[in-house]
Amino acid sequence: MPIKTRAPKDLGIDDFISFVRQLLLWLAGQVGDPDYRATLVDGLQAKFDALEAKFLEYKQLKIHVPEKNELYTNAADALHKGLSMLKGLLLSFFDDPDIHGFFGLANPIPTDLDELYSTGQVCFDQWATVSADPEYADVAPDFADVLVLFNDFVIKRDEYEAKFQAMQAAQNDMEELRAEIEEQERDLFNYYRSKHPKGDDPWWTDTPWGGTGEPEPGVEGEPPVGEWPSAPSEVGAELITDPSTFMRVYYTIPGGSDSVSIYRAVVPHGDPAPERPASPYTTEIGSEQYADTDIEAGNDYYYWVCGVQGGEEGDFAGPAMCEV
């Protein structure tokens, strides 16, 4: 079974950009091939350039967001101390026990930034209505000082949220562009593969896709699979460890099949390859992959797959083997 050399959906953005750059460098060496669709290649290059620009923008924004967040939280600490001071002043200055409730300070001053913002807003909205009352003249300077802290907090809050939203917008744009690039890359991959379906082109092993003439499981645009009872065009297995550990078995369903039977055999490391079991391990309907979670370290796992139509099994593909 040929080894899969890549899976774009599993690559981080840095690795993905490196991969596409490798792909475009390879394409530059193929410009003499009249069968390549220049519009597809040019479009891929344009989208890749746009992705790189967005990625740089996103990285810059990501640097600034923590800086803005630190200023925001520092302003929140200052506001928290200021409101705590006001609460103590109000308690010592007025006999009315409801005065704290009047200014929104009856409960402990919140440390949560959204709640702190709401408390400060209530406090100074109320202060605006009573600031001309002679009864409050002695605490007016203290309210004015804390109002400065509140206004600074609001400014820092708005700056942080603007940077954070800009970063999220850049990230969304980047992910959309990445999806478009992957789609265009798949088109190019399948176009190239349609010319050399067995991977027999002398250039094939020099492509960024590696030395396999088989598509990735589930890729749109694959050449049509023969009608049932043909065997699945491929079967493979790979160990997945993040976020949970399981064996991913993938295959291409033969045309006409109403389900797929998966046969499994398990042997300790180093033992000879086993024969296919007499009965299927599981049956899948409408899916081109299966997650086998019943696995243990120290074993080799073998999988065979066949299409099923009306309860009758077609030809088998496999075995695919992977160790744990």
Image (cartoon, helix red, strand yellow):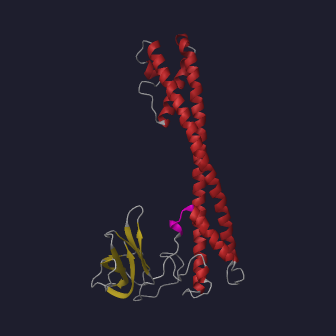
For the record, the magenta segment spans: 8-13
Where is residue 126? Give x, y as percent: 52, 23
Residue at the left extreme of this rendering = 278
Looking at the figure, which quarter contains the C terminus?
bottom left
Residue 244 screen position, x and y as percent: 38, 62
Whether residue 260 can be seen here = no
Left or right, residue 27 beside residue 221:
right
x%, y% of residue 265? 31, 80
Q: Residue at x 38, y 74 (%)?
A: 323
Q: Is residue 96 visible?
A: yes
Pick the front one: 241 or 213? 241
Q: Is residue 177 magenta?
A: no
Q: What x and y, as percent, mark residue 1?
A: 45, 83
Q: Main secondary structure of the magenta part?
A: helix
Q: Quadrant of residue 204?
A: bottom right
Left or right, residue 95 beside residue 66: left
Which residue: 68% across, 64% down? 49
Identified at 57% across, 88% down, the residue is 200
Nearer to the camera, 202 or 138: 202
Q: Is residue 46 above or below residue 145?
A: below
Is residue 123 placed above or below 245 in the rendered structure? above
Residue that lies at the very extreme toward the right in this rendered image: 32
Q: What is the residue that sits farthest to the front in this orientation?
A: 270
Up-down relation of residue 128 to residue 247 (above or below):
above
Q: Is residue 273 left or right of residue 21?
A: left
